[in-house]
Image (cartoon, rainbow, N blue to C red):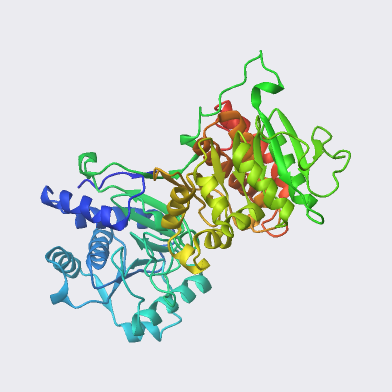
């Protein structure tokens, strides 16, 4: 029996699109159903994960087709010689015909069935693996009563006994589109692995999805590409970034790689502007100016290559301007921002500059009407201010909020956070695959803004610059943590050499750091 391939998949489709693809495929499916293929794929991955076969595999089968996939997986595991115990959490008569057939095959194969209340009161039982087939992508409300108790129980048991948990399609309780719980009070299965079918889902890679999905495997169930619509959302992965930055020609000079002006650094916040300027240096800009609202230092003793100016003393017309790090919200800051929006050759807007725009409809109109490259780098609170929404509303619809911002301001937007989202005004969207909690510290946003400005100066393409900046910024943190620096206590400055390294690796197409 064929079951497709276990492979990474950069395309992202939402639940509505997945349903349409599935409907087309079902109309043309062979004698081997999609549910059988899903069950076989789940069993195959379960066998690889289940290294300790001393104990049985526990299968949680819910009331819908996700439960049918679970029964099919149990049937396949039994055929392969694994001892499996199934907890049936749905009524037979309410299952689809395919799910009923899967359940019957599991029973005929001798699969053992457990009792929910007995299971919830047996803490001493150990399992080689727990398979979560409770709820799939169609869940609309939070699991309740005994099922909620079951999810909490399984999470505790898996944590206490180090039991791997394999979620089928999506961890139960997680919204596959948003990456958030299906409701504010929803419990979620904590998976160590997720096998997701037909295509990858956005919610597995942003918001809480990155905390609950674990290692993700995509299986297309052998569905032909002819059944897939045009894809506008993808993962922001290393392979897709190769060859955007070109190796530098020998006949180059500092003017070949653009000027970056970092505009910010009000009194008490000079460090933010200096961090952004240093990041622009490490990310490859030809010349870097740090234009300060506070009294500008004579030079940066760590990086004397950076040139300092007082704010307002340098023309913005021929440079890429990074405005916002340490800018403040004074009248002077407002005037400088207005000037930057009107005159800068290219623009990266961060931090306080975003807050000033959120409070001024005239600045918003000026920004929308710009015809030259522009990038916004808000965190969720800044995004909420820009859209006059709550942070919860932004986080509950991260993809939609990023698209709304991009269209409102005619810019490429990086909505920062777990699974940062990059989107342009045409609706082309990427979810970043790198980064970790080490980036949740002061100054890392300034570093991202500076790196984005340097890349924008070199590429003149806002989307390419945003994608590379976001990826290398997160990957720098990933490598540092992997090598023992952080995540607790990692500083923004420590990212800089790693950012330089990974930008060079992308430009020169090496395999290192993959």
Q: Residue at x 32, y 82 (%)?
A: 116
- Nearest the viewer among 318 and 52 is 318
Q: Is 307 drawn above or below residue 392 in the view shown?
A: above
Q: Quadrant of residue 229?
A: top left
Residue 182 spot, x, y in % from top left: 38, 70
Q: Is residue 227 left or right of residue 97?
A: right
Residue 369 spot, x, y in % from top left: 50, 42
Q: Is residue 187 left or right of residue 489?
A: left
Q: Residue at x 36, y 82 (%)?
A: 119
For the view shown, which residue lies furthest in the top direction? 251
Residue 167 spot, x, y in % from top left: 37, 62
Q: Residue at x 78, y 52 (%)?
A: 266
Residue 451 spot, x, y in % from top left: 64, 40
Q: Is 375 drawn above or below residue 507 in the view shown?
A: below
- Nearest the viewer among 87 and 168 is 168
Q: Answer yes or no: is residue 370 visible.
A: yes
């Amino acid at each position: 029996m064929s079951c497709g391939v276990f492979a990474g998949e950069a395309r992202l489709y939402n639940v509505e699109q997945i349903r349409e693809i599935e409907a087309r495929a079902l109309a043309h499916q062979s004698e081997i159903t999609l549910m059988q293929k899903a069950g076989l794929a789940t069993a195959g991955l379960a066998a690889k994960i289940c290294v300790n076969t001393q104990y049985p595999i526990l299968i949680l089968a819910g009331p819908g087709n996700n439960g049918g996939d679970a029964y099919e997986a149990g049937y396949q595991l039994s055929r392969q010689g694994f001892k499996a115990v199934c907890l049936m959490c749905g009524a037979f008569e309410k299952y689809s015909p395919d799910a009923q057939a899967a359940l019957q095959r599991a029973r005929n194969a001798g699969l053992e069935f457990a009792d929910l209340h007995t299971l919830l009161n047996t803490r001493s039982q150990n399992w080689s693996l727990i398979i979560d087939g409770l709820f799939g992508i169609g869940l609309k409300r939070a699991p309740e009563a005994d099922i909620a108790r079951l999810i909490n129980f399984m999470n505790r048991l898996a944590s206490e006994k180090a039991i791997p948990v394999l979620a089928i399609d999506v961890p139960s309780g997680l919204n596959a589109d948003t990456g958030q719980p299906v409701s504010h009070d929803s419990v979620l299965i904590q998976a160590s692995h997720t096998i997701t079918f037909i295509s990858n889902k956005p919610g597995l890679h942003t918001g809480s999805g990155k905390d609950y999905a674990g290692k993700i495997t995509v299986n297309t169930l052998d569905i032909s590409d002819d059944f897939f619509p045009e894809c506008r959302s993808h993962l922001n992965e290393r392979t897709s970034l190769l060859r955007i930055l070109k190796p530098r020609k020998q006949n180059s000079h500092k003017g070949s790689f653009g000027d970056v002006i970092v505009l910010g650094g009000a009194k008490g916040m000079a460090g933010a502007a200096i961090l952004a300027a240093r990041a622009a240096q490490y990310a490859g800009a030809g010349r870097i100016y740090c234009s300060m609202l506070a009294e500008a230092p004579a030079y940066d003793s760590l990086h004397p290559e950076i040139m300092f100016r007082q704010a307002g003393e340098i023309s913005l017309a021929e440079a890429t301007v990074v405005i916002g790090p340490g800018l403040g919200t004074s009248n002077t800051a407002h005037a400088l921002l207005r000037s930057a929006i009107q005159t800068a050759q290219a623009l990266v807007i961060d931090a306080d500059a975003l807050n000033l725009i959120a409070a001024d409809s005239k600045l918003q109109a000026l920004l929308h009407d710009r015809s030259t490259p522009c990038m916004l780098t808000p965190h969720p609170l800044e995004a909420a201010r820009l859209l006059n929404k709550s942070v919860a509303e932004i986080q509950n619809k991260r993809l939609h909020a990023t698209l709304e911002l991009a269209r409102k301001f005619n810019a490429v937007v990086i909505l920062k956070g777990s699974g940062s989202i990059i989107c342009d005004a045409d609706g082309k969207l990427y979810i970043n695959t790198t980064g970790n909690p080490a980036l949740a510290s002061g100054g890392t946003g300034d570093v991202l803004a500076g790196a984005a400005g340097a890349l924008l100066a070199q590429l003149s393409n806002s989307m390419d610059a945003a994608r590379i900046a976001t990826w290398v910024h997160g990957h720098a943190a990933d490598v540092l943590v992997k090598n023992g620096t952080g995540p607790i206590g990692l500083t923004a400055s420590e990212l800089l050499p790693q950012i330089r390294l990974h930008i060079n690796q992308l430009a020169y197409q090496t395999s290192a750091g993959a």
